[in-house]
Amino acid sequence: MAAADNVANNIIVVQDNNVPNIVKPTIDLSKLSDEEKWRIEHKRLHEKHKGHEAMHAEMVLILISVLIVAQVILVQWKQRRYKSYQAVTLAGMWIIPFFFSINAHWWRFLVIWFIFSIITGHIIFKATRKPLPGTTPRLVYKWFYILYKLSYGLGIAGYSIVMGTLLNLNLLFLVRTETAMDCGVLLLFYGLYYGVLGRDFAEIVTEFMAAHIGYYTKTGLPGRTLEANICAVCGQQIFIPDEDEEVLERAYELGCKHRFHEFCIRGWCIVGKKQICPYCKEKVDLKRLFKNPWERPHVLYGQLLDWIRYLVAWQPIIVLIVQGINYGLGLE
């Protein structure tokens, strides 16, 4: 019985539609070459999906239409309600990869995600306390600046490994191409993902702290008058260098003659993505502020991360919407 079943599985019956009820000799697939077997299987698959071209064209049309509509909605939302758009995008970037990682069992990403979330949550908690301790702004800038440096370094390292692998440089180190490429892509992903996530959290927290201190408001005049030798970023006193006293941190004066702690104004511009004076909103000369040429790419790097937000936060949602429409219309 088993032998008969095996023979039946390897036999295909070909029937001519022009000659009904007449069965042509059967073909033993076990005696055919691999190329002939592939042709027969391909023909059977083509006949099975015959007539699906129109369905596929309709699915592509739905995908293109949803992408266009989604782009228009997102652009208008960002222009009209930037705060809500920023909050929803940040929530999507933070939560969506978490659920994908659980489903795919990416435990390494989950561990790093939990560590990042715990530390960042603690920083945000301290930054939203009232009254705001004088040491909190420096702590916030320090954490996000370190995160920013790490993400930038990981991104550069991952990109370098990927490009080196494409040039077969991995063979000089006796590393397999698949291993080197996986390592490069992984480092590039971590650098870009946490770079964007850290910058978005930092922008929200930075603006909240500055508005709470009272020397800065996003619209309108500041709520407090900036006194002499007071930093408008952290609200603490700026110590003037003295011959008999060593100053741990230098002060920096902008073109508008307002003075800040050097670390505070760097954190304000790099981490908080603000390129204006925290008090009078005059444009900051970034070339004069960052004289070291190795620091200037950091400013440009932050502007190159915007497309990651769409890829991580909105692309999965758009794909789910397209699948829902296809399912509702009965498209396979």
Image (cartoon, rainbow, N blue to C red):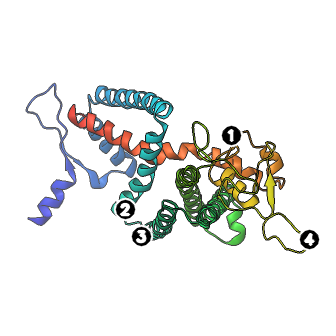
Residue at x 28%, y 55% (from the top left corner): 30
Residue 169 on image: x %, y %: 71, 62
The first of marks 4 and 1 along the sequence is 4
Residue at x 13%, y 59% (from the top left corner): 5
> Which disc, if any, is residue 331?
none
For disc 1, the marked residue is 281
Which label lies toward us, 3 or 4? 4
For disc 4, the marked residue is 243
Residue at x 55%, y 42% (from the top left corner): 307
Residue 254 on image: x %, y %: 79, 47
The amino acid beneath tag 1 is Lys
Q: Quadrant of the C terminus?
A: top left
The first of marks 4 and 2 along the sequence is 2
> Which disc, if any, is residue 107?
3
Which label lies toward us, 2 or 3? 3
Q: Quadrant of the N terminus?
A: bottom left
Element on which disc 4 rests: loop
The first of marks 3 and 1 along the sequence is 3
What is the spatial separation of the Cα atoms under label 2 and label 3, in whole angstroms?
9 Å
The first of marks 3 and 4 along the sequence is 3
Q: Quadrant of residue 20?
A: top left
What is the spatial separation of the Cα atoms under label 1 and label 2, in whole angstroms?
46 Å
